[in-house]
Image (cartoon, rainbow, N blue to C red):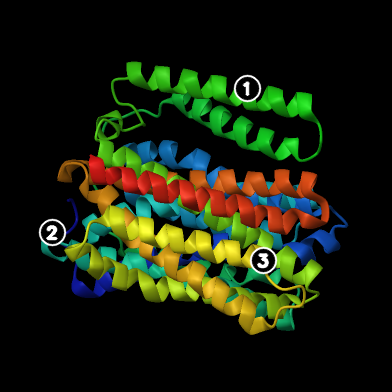
């Protein structure tokens, strides 16, 4: 890769610091806001279902932008796309903090999600530019930690901030890290570019397909069935047009060659189901704790922490287990444990002790940790080495598609479920976890 030979060890450290900061912020952007949703809902006098769109907008925007941004990264260069993505993310954080209305906050989160897509796609791929071939695995290990640790600490960080400040500070804490943008531009080497134009038709169809479908699922929660049905049908129609257009394109954004590998395709679907289960629980838990159990936002943040904390602890152990045991088995066991933990949350006592909640969520975290690393390994190694970039893009896309679908379902369930909305979300999350376990098991026969 271009630039490796002229990159000193000192510059490499600075570049990696900037990359890890950006990836950590984008991961934190997904995890830190959930705890504050009830506060945001009260601040704008909005419904719970409407407030959930603060999460939905971020996930949806990132999902829509992943494939087009990956294409742009090849033509404009990873350096430009990463720097632009991080700058957009930071500026949108300021917009979120000072948003005077919920619609403006949601709009700022849409922009923030687009920036996060640039960071996610270009940041991981830039590791191959920064490190010589023999050291790439070291860089990818650092990337995994940069994504996992903020995700694990997100609820705790949110609780600590909300203990001393109001929810806008959840976004303002990102602003000082904007210094990483000029530092990255100065230190990062130039990278190779491919003569490739952006597929505008494919980009538009991709946005319409995912956007209309997710918005339609959320609209169902408002009780406006005809409009919601129209949005969902239109989204599915655009998805069909998108796939057809990509099949005819000489350089498609969708990696059809990888989808012809059953192991890869099943790993993608396992990932979608699992991340949908995760976000269904993550977004609904604050409402369960603050509305039903009357806990403060700070207490809620600390009470949610066992899940991501145990995920961070279990993920490296699962990676070592993958060396000796099939990934399909480890993932299936993990997702079954996740489903059991969610089922136990459904049957919480009426006035549970905090310990009763904590050990159940810890079980969920252990199960999710057992799934995450083996499934990512299976997905990244299912295809040829030369297609690692495309596999990485689909890995991120599967994660964001699952999050977007789960977030939209939370809006639907809260719109229809009344006071039992949070419990209904747990049941839906359990169903997705079991579907993921079944899909993972199918890999044993491929």
Image location (x, y in percent) of residue 394: 36, 43
Residues at discs 3 and 2 in contact (Cβ within 8 Å): no
- Of marks 1 and 3, the one in the foreground: 3
Q: Residue at x 17, y 59 (%)?
A: 4
Q: Quadrant of residue 126?
A: bottom left
Image location (x, y in percent) of residue 398: 43, 45
Residue density around tag 1, few if under 14, some if 14–19, many if 20 or more, within 10 Å: some
**Which disc, if any, is residue 117?**
none
What is the spatial separation of the Cα atoms under label 3 and label 2, in whole angstroms? 51 Å
Q: Residue at x 44, y 42 (%)?
A: 66
Decide if residue 115 is in sight here. Answer: no
Q: Work out which quarter of the rendered image holds the C terminus and state it.
A: top left
| Residue picked out by circle 1 | 233
In the picture shown, does residue 33 fall above or below 50? below
N-term mark: 1 or 2 = 2
Residue density around tag 3, few if under 14, some if 14–19, many if 20 or more, within 10 Å: few
- Of marks 3 and 2, the one in the foreground: 3
Decide if residue 159 is in sight here. Answer: yes
What is the spatial separation of the Cα atoms under label 1 and label 3, in whole angstroms? 36 Å
Residue farthest to the right?
A: 45
Asked if residue 75 lies left or right of residue 39, the reply is left
Residue density around tag 2, few if under 14, some if 14–19, many if 20 or more, within 10 Å: few
| Residue picked out by circle 3 | 347
What is the spatial separation of the Cα atoms under label 1 and label 2, in whole angstroms? 46 Å
| Residue picked out by circle 2 | 133
């Amino acid at each position: 890769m271009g630039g490796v030979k002229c990159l000193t060890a000192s510059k490499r450290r600075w570049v990696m610091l900037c990359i890890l900061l950006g990836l950590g912020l984008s991961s934190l952007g997904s995890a830190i806001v959930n705890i504050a949703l009830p506060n945001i809902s009260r601040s704008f006098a909005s419904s719970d279902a409407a407030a959930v769109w603060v999460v939905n907008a971020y996930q949806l925007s990132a999902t829509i932008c992943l494939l087009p941004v990956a294409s742009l990264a090849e033509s404009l260069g990873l350096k430009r796309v990463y720097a632009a993505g991080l700058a957009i993310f930071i500026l949108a954080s300021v917009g979120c903090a000072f948003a005077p209305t919920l619609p403006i906050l949601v709009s700022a989160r849409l922009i923030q999600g687009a920036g996060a897509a640039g960071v996610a796609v270009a940041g991981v791929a830039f590791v191959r530019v920064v490190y010589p071939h023999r050291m790439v695995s070291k860089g990818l290990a650092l990337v995994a930690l940069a994504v996992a640790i903020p995700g694990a600490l997100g609820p705790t960080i949110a609780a600590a901030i909300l203990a001393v400040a109001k929810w806008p500070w959840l976004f303002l804490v990102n602003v000082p890290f904007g210094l990483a943008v000029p530092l990255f531009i100065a230190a990062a080497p130039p990278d190779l570019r491919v003569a490739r134009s952006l597929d505008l038709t494919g980009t538009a169809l991709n946005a319409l397909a995912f956007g209309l479908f997710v918005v339609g699922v959320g609209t169902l929660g408002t009780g406006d069935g005809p409009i919601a049905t129209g949005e969902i049908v239109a989204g599915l129609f655009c998805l069909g047009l998108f796939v057809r257009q990509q099949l005819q394109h000489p350089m498609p954004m969708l990696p059809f060659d990888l989808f012809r590998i059953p192991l890869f395709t099943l790993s993608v679907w396992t990932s979608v189901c699992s991340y949908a289960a995760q976000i269904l629980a993550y977004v609904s838990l604050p409402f369960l704790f603050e509305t039903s159990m009357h806990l403060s936002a700070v207490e809620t943040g600390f009470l949610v922490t066992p899940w991501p904390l145990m995920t961070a602890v279990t993920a490296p152990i699962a990676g070592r287990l993958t060396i000796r045991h099939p990934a399909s088995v480890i993932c299936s066991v993990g997702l079954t444990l996740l489903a059991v933990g969610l089922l136990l949350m459904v049957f919480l006592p009426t006035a549970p002790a905090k310990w009763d909640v904590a050990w159940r969520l810890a079980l969920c975290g252990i199960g999710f940790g057992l799934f995450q690393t083996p499934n990512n390994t299976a997905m990244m190694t299912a295809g040829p080495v030369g297609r690692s970039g495309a596999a990485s893009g689909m890995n991120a896309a599967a994660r964001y598609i699952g999050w977007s679908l789960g977030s939209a379902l939370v809006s639907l369930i809260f719109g229809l479920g009344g006071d039992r909305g949070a419990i209904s979300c747990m049941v839906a999350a359990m169903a997705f976890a079991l579907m993921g376990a079944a899909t993972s098991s199918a890999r044993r026969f491929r």
